[in-house]
Amino acid sequence: KPEIRYSIRLSLLSCSITAILSLIVAVPTGYLFSRYEFFGRDFLDAVLDIPIVLPPLVVGLSLLILFQFVPEYLRGFREAIVYQIPAVIIAQFMVACAFAVRTMRATFDQMDSRREQVALTLGCTRAQAFGYVVLPEVQRGILTAGTLAWARALGEFGPLLIFAGATRNKTEVLSTTVFLELSIGNLEAAVAVSLIMVVSAVIVLIVARVWGTRELEL
């Protein structure tokens, strides 16, 4: 069906963008939480867990309410986001990013910081030590965080349904396709789409494991 083909394309696009955005946020945030003590650190650490522990529908409703308080002169911006394709990415990002941050923080916690300290004593700036020493050390963690964010975004449903809607050929992704096909009694299509999601997630995880192992051996 054309609608299902569209949902596949949108899912691949939105999940990839979500994974990239999650890594952009997760890498520096995980490093910050792992290496530095600062005021409000415990509070921010707890805030990161909110999208994980909240019911998915509440996450979507919270986003919807948040955008209702946008000033009137930004009404066009709100209309360009809510129930549009950007809303799909934002809804996926809210939950996927939290998992990516947790993964990157655990990665940095497990990393031996002595090489970074040696680089600093040899004249490297903090940014140079991070780029030349830290990032190569945590490549597998970045890969794991990215694939986890991608797989989590693929399975997101509740926030999408509330914040982005499930409009066919507009904001429909694979998870909402399953819901729409079940709502009209088309069990065969729902099962087929579910299998596509399972196979996609398995392929991504296998590629990440094989690539990560190869990088480690090299």
Image (cartoon, rainbow, N blue to C red):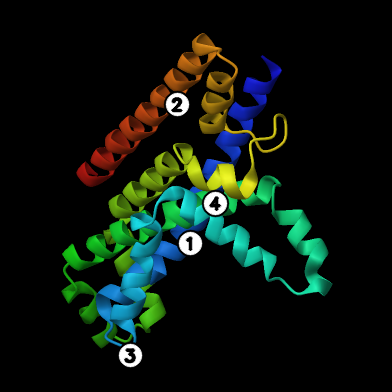
**Separation (CA) of disc 1 from disc 3:** 23 Å
Quadrant of residue 217 in the image? Answer: top left
Residue type at the position of mark 4 = Ala
Where, quadrant-wise, is the C terminus in this rendering? top left
Residue, disc 1: 24
Residue at x 61%, y 58% (from the top left corner): 64
**Separation (CA) of disc 1 from disc 4:** 17 Å
- 207 is higher (above) or lower (below) than 141: above
Q: Is residue 181 visible?
A: yes
- Asked which secondary structure carries label 4, the reply is helix
Residue, disc 3: 39
Q: Is residue 92 left or right of residue 149?
A: right
Sequence-first disc among 1 and 4: 1
| Label 4: how many Cα within 10 Å (few below 14, some 14–19, many 20+) | many
Task: Check residue 208 in the rendering and tell me which mark sits there, or answer none.
Answer: none
- Asked which secondary structure carries label 2, the reply is helix
Label pair 2/3, CB-CB below 8 angstroms: no
Sequence-first disc among 1 and 3: 1
**Separation (CA) of disc 3 from disc 4:** 29 Å
Residue at x 47%, y 37% (from the top left corner): 154
Q: Is residue 158 left or right of residue 42?
A: right
Where, quadrant-wise, is the N terminus in this rendering? top right
**Separation (CA) of disc 2 from disc 1:** 25 Å
Sequence-first disc among 4 and 2: 4
Residue, disc 2: 197
Residue type at the position of mark 2 = Met
Residue type at the position of mark 1 = Ile
Label pair 3/4, CB-CB below 8 angstroms: no
